[in-house]
Amino acid sequence: MKICIDVDGVLCELRQPEQSYADVQPLPGATEKMNSLKQAGHYIILNTARHMATCNSNVGLVVARQGKTLMDWLAQHNIPYDELWFGKPHADVYLDDNAHRFTSWKEISGDGSNLPVSHEKRQKKSP
């Protein structure tokens, strides 16, 4: 399954005004569940709207300002992923602190079998 997971508020705590994004901590259970989902064979897309408002939705500017910081943070905390998006890509499942009403990693099974499939899942068109 293709799973799209928001970074801020799902993988890590929300940054406080006095904090750097490099200093935020993973939410309890995030690293372990992410590794379980990956080991179960899921394709993981991470997405973030970090700095999108500040940079007036200029993705190039956002990546220049935050891309390396986020990739370094993910590596430091051993969080696996297949794609990293600044914005929201289409996926079968969205784990997002806004869309899924994410509260904790305790509610997610290690193999992802209890994830709610998005109602927006597109049906394949016949040729």
Image: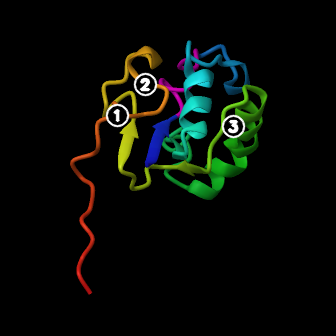
Give the magenta part as a residue range. Answer: 7-16
The relative height of residue 18 versus residue 31 in the rendered view (above or below) is: above
- Helix, strand or loop at disc 2? loop
Q: Residues within 10 Å of mark 3 (few under 14, many from 20)?
A: some
Q: Amino acid at mark 2?
A: Ser
Q: Quadrant of residue 126?
A: bottom left
Tell me whether circle 3 and circle 1 mark residues in contact (CB < 8 Å). Answer: no
Q: Quadrant of residue 54?
A: top right
- Helix, strand or loop at disc 1? loop
Q: Is residue 4 magenta?
A: no
Left or right of 58 on screen, residue 90: left
Cα–Cα gap, marks 3 and 1 = 25 Å
Q: Identify the residue under disc 1.
A: 115
Q: Position of residue 58 (x, y in %)?
A: 55, 55
Q: Quadrant of the C terminus?
A: bottom left
Q: Identify the residue under disc 2.
A: 109
Q: Which mark is residue 70?
A: 3
Q: Position of residue 32 (x, y in %)?
A: 61, 22
